[in-house]
Image (cartoon, rainbow, N blue to C red):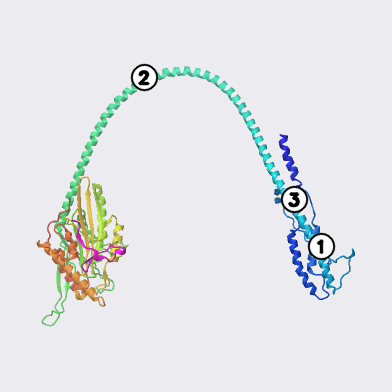
Amino acid sequence: MERQRSPLLQVKVNTEPKTHLAKASSRLPLAGSRLKRGLEQMEPALEPAKKRTRGLGPSAPLSTASQSQTAVQKLPRKTGPCPPATALKNQRLAPTVPAQKPAAPAVPVVGGKKPGKRPGWDLKGQLCDLNAELKRCREKAQTLHQENQQLRDQLQEAQQQASALGMERSSLEGELAQVRAQAEQGQQQLGSLSARVLELEERLGTQEGLVHVLRKEQLELQEERRTLTTRLEGQERRLQASETALSSSQAEVASLRRENEAQAALLAERGDRLHGLEMERRRLHNQLQELKGNIRVFCRVRPVLAGEPTPSPGFLVFPPGPGGPSDVPTRLSLSRSDDRRGTLTGAPAPPTRLEFSFDRVFPPESRQDEVFEEIAMLVQSALDGYPVCIFAYGQTGSGKTFTMEGGPAGDPQLEGLIPRALRHLFSVAEEMSGQGWTYSFVASYVEIYNETVRDLLATGSRKGQGGECEIRRAGPGSEELTVTNARYIPVSCEREVRALLQLAHQNRAVARTAQNERSSRSHSVFQLQISGEHTARGLQCGAPLNLVDLAGSERLDSSLALGPGERDRLRETQAINSSLSTLGLVIMALSNKEPHVPYRNSKLTYLLQNSLGGSAKMLMFVNISPLEDNASESLNSLRFASKVNQCIIGTAQANKR
């Protein structure tokens, strides 16, 4: 162990004197090249001195050289081994001691004696003195440069020697650590062997004690064996009792299974009965709707808007229903005065009062929910498999669009028939799902403008391509009609329906007329194809629900708008009146059971022909204005609706498969 530590002590001794060299190196002068460069810069400064006038003192470069020489002479010289690199790095360089400025300029010595001061006119002598001084400074600088180079070589040699010693020291430290590890390992092995000996001695004592314990346990196990034998006999007796109870339980399970089968049969019987009741409900519901009429006409009078003149009290009168004032009104009385008529005395003739009777009349104060409540059962018929068609008819500005679509979005009290009808259908379909029925709904929204079909749900580049939409059969031999290039969108919630209505409202063709600032100049048709299926019973039903907002039914002279679009308004009005006339002819032909029904005379009747026949249920809202200025148009609308109300179509049949 002592032989391994001696090199470490030697390294420590060798490294101690190196610190003096590090301290000395911090006070080394500037590099020789730097001092030489300073002297070379002094030579050009001496040239102008030859041209100076007499009386000038010694030049500045000489003073600078003297200061450099003084600083060099004051630097101590120390020799010895160079310190290691680590010692040099840890030593801070001492600041260079600034040279003191001499009290007087140096004067060259001639012949070993200090000469006197040269006169100011002896410029040549002064120049010689300066050259001699410059030569001595250069020699001194060269000497200092050589000494600096020697010191640098010694420093490099010392650094190399320190690096080698550091490597040797690391090697020795590694060997020392290895020897110490071996010693520690030996100590650990010795300790483990000692512990092993103690452990074996303890195990020997334990084994001896265990032998005594095992002998004692042997006696106990023999006693326990006798006890277990007794218990086994008791368990066998209990097993026999359990087998007897199991037989009784199996008999009880068989009884429960028979009871379960009886309950399942009763449940199936009740399901059949419930299905029968549902079919009976549909039959009675349809019978009730037929008693009300497969063609029904409701009249709705809109309220007076802000800025409109208030009509006279007797212009519109709503007589009470057959059951008295508490009964819903079904009649409407309109008073009309004719200025062309007169009495013999020349006084104007008294106003003529005209009476109209409909299935239901809604006064101006009627709310949207009251109107829908009256048609909710008719919408239910569409879910039962009966085609249903609901029209809104009347002049421009009479409230048709408000009745069908509603007022501004966001107010639930102003929702029209379309959103309320779909909410009702979704709710009833969810209730019917508990009876095994599943329903799907597919919506489309088109308009007929100037006998051209347009898709109101078109988006992007498909907007304005209504001319490409045509009414075609769904397939060979099929009675179902579809509109080519129109979007048919599955819907399942109110939010989707609201988005479709908003898109259709933006795309619909409107214009300004003499009757309304924003008049609908087309027939809008919202179609909802309903499909229902009862998988367990193999039943299917399907029917369309058509909600139609017809264009204004005014005459030509009152709907023409002033301006460059007069011809367009005239052509629109002619197309609207032509299609409305065709609708009346179709209803009359169906009522009279004529062999030919002119469906194809109009795109409107051709699209709705499956919802206008004998297997369909139809309802018309005639909307009129409460203003006396619109009395003529209101009278025409009421007369047309009265003719439709007198029509009777055959019994409707459900579309079941």
State yes or no: discs 2 and 3 in contact (Cβ < 8 Å): no
Q: Which mark is residue 233?
A: 2
Q: Which dot, 1 or 2, sits closer to the camera?
A: 1
The picture quadrant where one finds residue 557 is bottom left
Q: Amino acid at mark 3?
A: Gln
Nearer-N-terminus badge (1/2): 1
Q: Is residue 161 left or right of residue 74?
A: left
Q: Which dot, 2 or 3, sits closer to the camera?
A: 3
Q: Which residue is mark 3?
A: 154
Q: Indicate yes or no whether the magenta region holds residue 459.
A: yes
Q: Which mark is residue 252?
A: none
Q: Nearer the viewer, residue 580 or 91?
A: 91
User: Where 244 falls versus 348 (above or below)?
Assistant: above
Mark 1 closeness class: few <14, some 14–19, many ≥20 residues within 10 Å: some
User: Where 517 falls versus 247 (above or below)?
Assistant: below
Q: Amino acid at mark 2?
A: Glu
Q: Residue at x 29, y 57 (%)?
A: 494
Q: Residue at x 19, y 44 (%)?
A: 272
Mark 3 closeness class: few <14, some 14–19, many ≥20 residues within 10 Å: some
Say what secondary structure mark 3 lies in.
helix
Q: Which residues are magenta?
A: 448-475
Q: Amino acid at mark 1?
A: Arg
Nearer-N-terminus badge (2/3): 3
User: Where 314 falls versus 212 (above or below)?
Assistant: below
Q: Indicate yes or no whether the magenta region holds residue 15.
A: no
Q: Quadrant of the N terminus?
A: top right
Q: Which residue is mark 1?
A: 136
